[in-house]
Amino acid sequence: MPAFARTELEEMIRRFVATNDECGKTGNWEPLANFYAKDAIYTWNNGPKYEFVARGRDEIRKFVFGTEMAGLENWNYPYVKVLIDDAQGEVIGFWRQLADERRADGSVYEIAGTGGSWFRYAGNFQWSWQRDFFDHANAGAIFMEMQKNGQLNETMQERVRAGSKM
């Protein structure tokens, strides 16, 4: 017997991805916090000495979908592949990172490399744990290119000047 019904996990992903896509349109990422259990943990690594950890839905809402998305409100993170392990209640989703600005030649700024999230399902259409992974060097390169081209918004410029660990 699987830990969770595959149909339930598929529905969870459908709802989550639909909300993710809507957040990219509205620029408000906070609705995604509703998909996390009250005691959920959300993490990512940013180099050998910095591990980001948000504990609980309130911190996830405030820091992950608030502070850490500041300046990235209208970026899009479309999911391109989702792998479901219903026996363990885990999901891995791979996504792209697309800026809301375009280069002079019309091409979109996109952070190269692999972007993704590893989720642990808690039931009741909520995640209990998430670990993001993406290429920080490529993210920095895109931000620098956008800044050089005068297309990095003021919020992101300030984060870069302040030495954000993002």
Image: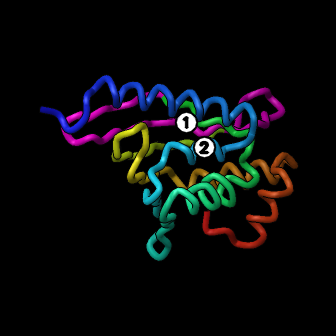
Where the C terminus falls, by quadrant? Answer: bottom right
- The answer to whether marks 1 and 2 mark residues whose Cβ atoms lie closer than 8 Å is yes
Residue sitting at x 60%, y 40%:
97
Q: Say the numbered circle drawn on residue 111.
A: 2
Image coords of residue 44 (percent x, y): 47, 59
Q: Amino acid at mark 1?
A: Arg
The residue pinned by badge 1 equals: 96
- Is 83 situated left or right of 143 in this image? left
Q: Amino acid at mark 2?
A: Ile
Disc 2 is placed on an element classified as loop
- Is 160 situated left or right of 36 in this image? right
Image coords of residue 96 (percent x, y): 55, 36
Q: Is residue 104 magenta?
A: yes
Mark closest to the chain's N terminus, 1 or 2 = 1
Colour basis? rainbow
- Is 118 situated left or right of 52 in this image? left
- Graded by Cα atoms within 10 Å as few (under 14), some (14 to 19) or many (20 or more), the crowding at tag 2 reads many
Magenta residues, as a range?
80-109
Q: Residue 30 or 146: which is nearer the viewer?
A: 30
Outermost residue toward the bottom?
49
Residue sitting at x 44%, y 36%:
94
Image coords of residue 120 (percent x, y): 34, 47
**Front label number (1 vs 2):** 1
- Seen in the picture, residue 132 relative to 108 is either above or below; the reply is below
- Seen in the picture, residue 14 relative to 164 is either above or below; the reply is above
- Seen in the picture, residue 9 relative to 49 is either above or below; the reply is above
Image coords of residue 165 (percent x, y): 61, 68
Label 1 to label 2, Cα distance in Å? Answer: 7 Å
> For residue 164, which quarter of the picture?
bottom right
